[in-house]
């Protein structure tokens, strides 16, 4: 009764707070605008970090929730800074949370599996700047590798990702060596004090040199891990044969996207995900509180809940399988083993910040001397040819038409910017359904990249032919 009176008393204040925060988020979303918050619970969930326990029916009485949430907001200095940014009072946030606790949802508590941090087991290399990088190998050994494939992982993942479920026998059939590694601060890799996408590409080439990949190699990027694969094409193109992009993410705030591409991308995402993108751009420190209450809470959870994903039918079926759950839990446990939020915040910020290059830079073109007498004289006396810029190798993209994590509109944008990229559209497939634990899918991907399987090189004394190393596609 007292709560109802307080809510009635604070109603005008609540409406003002609600409208201001909606407006602030939409403005911050920029060109990716569209939609408003249709769930009162987002206020408590996204600002105070009480998260899934509130919105997913985590149980508990109104009184205990009221006290816990009030304490959390009062203690949280960053949250208070964020609230003051929009001139928002603390009490309406609490009342919104209380209003949504007993909303008719099932409050039964399911058994939650605790996170287990495993003993260190990775092979590591020493990088030129003194950091260590952990990596993992699959397939044929280096001296018998016909093709080398290096795969950076995405957010909340590790060196154990690669192509989940790919069989050693399949890699051997194609003579492929698959090398995956932990990004800085993930798994058993040391953090990087000032990492960016340029340093990410340099880490990749240092890894290749250290593990004996002397020839050009292929790069594989899945989901947000594609960000690091795009960087490799930009910063170390002379070491890359080609790229295999599986549902590749791009910067959702990329100014080169059309309004239609932006709208079709953002409309697929749940509100919590949109807010987290906004926070990563404007208030990245706030992400700490979300991460501490989800994948850094010491408990396991479903991938769609932890990462605020909306999934299609096939993807929902995939994540319910025991094999996927076993993989997901182990991958997360390795990813978070350092129990530090910083690398995850860095990764989130990198994704939505200025990449220092545009995807259009990867389009192959001739760069001739600029206009004016001095560039012309320099060109005439040096007899230099026009310089080729961009990435000259093949780019293959696989995209599910029912992917709601990386919507097809993102791939449409890439295809428009990079017309030489080959897009393989996968009818009715989602974000995980084609790439995870699908033997035939993995065979199709390798066949597209490498042609018919030729097996490993027969001996260490027989070198790779240069043409085959640089142009292995059919």
Image (spheres, rainbow, N blue to C red):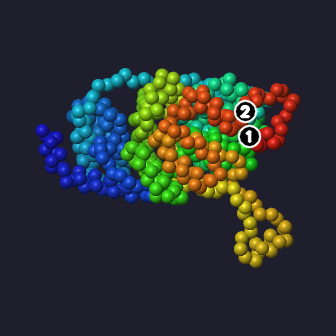
Of residue 441 and residue 304, the one placed in the foreground of this image is 441
State whether residue 354 appears in this view: yes
Q: Is residue 1 left or right of residue 137?
A: left
Which numbered marker is on residue 228?
none
In the rendered view, does 187 fall on the left or right side of 295? right
90 vs 186: above or below: below
Q: Is residue 133 visible?
A: no
Q: Which residue is mark 2?
A: 452
Q: Nearer the viewer, residue 122 or 315?
A: 315
Q: Residue furthest right?
A: 461
Residue 409, position as x, y percentages in the image = 50, 49
**Of all residues shown, which one is farthest toward the front?**
427
Residue shown at the point (48%, 45%) measured from the top left: 407
Q: Residue at x 71, y 36 (%)?
A: 450
> Do the residues bearing badges 2 and 1 touch, measured as CB atoms within 8 Å?
yes
In which image quadrant can residue 288 be found?
A: top left
The numbered mark at residue 474 is: 1
Q: Residue shown at 30%/32% (left/top)?
A: 57
């Amino acid at each position: 009764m007292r709560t109802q009176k307080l809510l009635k008393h604070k109603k005008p204040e609540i409406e003002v707070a609600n409208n201001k925060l909606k407006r602030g988020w939409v403005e911050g979303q920029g060109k990716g605008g569209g939609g408003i918050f249709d769930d009162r619970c987002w206020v408590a969930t996204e600002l105070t970090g009480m998260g899934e326990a509130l919105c997913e029916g985590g149980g508990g009485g109104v009184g205990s929730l009221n006290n816990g949430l009030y304490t959390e907001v009062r203690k949280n200095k960053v949250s208070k800074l964020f609230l003051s940014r929009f001139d928002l009072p603390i009490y309406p946030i609490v009342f919104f949370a209380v209003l949504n606790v007993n909303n008719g949802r099932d409050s039964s508590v399911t058994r939650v599996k605790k996170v287990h941090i495993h003993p260190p087991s990775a092979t590591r290399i020493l990088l030129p700047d003194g950091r260590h990088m952990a990596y993992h190998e699959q397939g044929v050994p280096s001296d018998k590798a016909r093709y080398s494939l290096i795969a950076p992982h995405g957010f909340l993942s590790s060196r154990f990702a690669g192509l989940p479920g790919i069989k050693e026998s399949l890699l051997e059939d194609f003579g492929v060596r698959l090398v995956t590694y932990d990004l800085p601060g993930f798994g058993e890799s040391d953090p990087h004090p000032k990492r960016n996408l340029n340093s990410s590409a340099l880490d990749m080439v240092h890894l290749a040199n250290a593990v004996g990949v002397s020839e050009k190699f292929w790069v594989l990027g899945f989901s947000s891990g594609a960000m690091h694969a795009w960087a490799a094409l930009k910063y170390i193109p002379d070491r890359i044969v080609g790229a295999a992009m599986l549902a590749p993410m791009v910067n959702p705030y990329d100014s080169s996207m059309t309004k239609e591409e932006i709208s079709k991308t953002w409309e697929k995402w749940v509100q919590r995900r949109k807010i987290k993108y906004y926070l990563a751009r404007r208030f990245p420190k706030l992400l700490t509180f979300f991460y501490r209450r989800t994948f850094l809470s010491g408990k396991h959870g479903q991938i769609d809940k932890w990462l605020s994903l909306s999934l299609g039918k096939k993807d929902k079926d995939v994540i319910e399988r025991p094999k996927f759950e076993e993989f997901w839990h182990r991958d997360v446990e390795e990813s978070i083993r350092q129990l530090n939020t910083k690398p995850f915040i860095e990764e989130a910020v990198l994704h939505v910040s200025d990449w220092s290059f545009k995807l259009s830079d990867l389009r192959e073109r001739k760069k001739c001397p600029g206009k004016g007498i001095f560039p012309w004289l320099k060109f005439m006396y040096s007899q230099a040819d026009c310089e080729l810029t961009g990435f000259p190798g093949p780019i293959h993209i696989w995209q599910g038409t029912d992917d709601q994590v990386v919507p097809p509109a993102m791939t449409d944008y890439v295809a428009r910017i990079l017309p030489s990229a080959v897009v393989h559209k996968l009818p009715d497939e989602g974000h995980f359904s084609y790439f995870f634990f699908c033997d035939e899918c993995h065979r199709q991907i390798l066949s597209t990249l490498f042609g018919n399987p030729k097996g490993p090189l027969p001996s260490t004394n027989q070198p790779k032919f240069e043409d085959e190393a640089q142009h292995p596609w059919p």
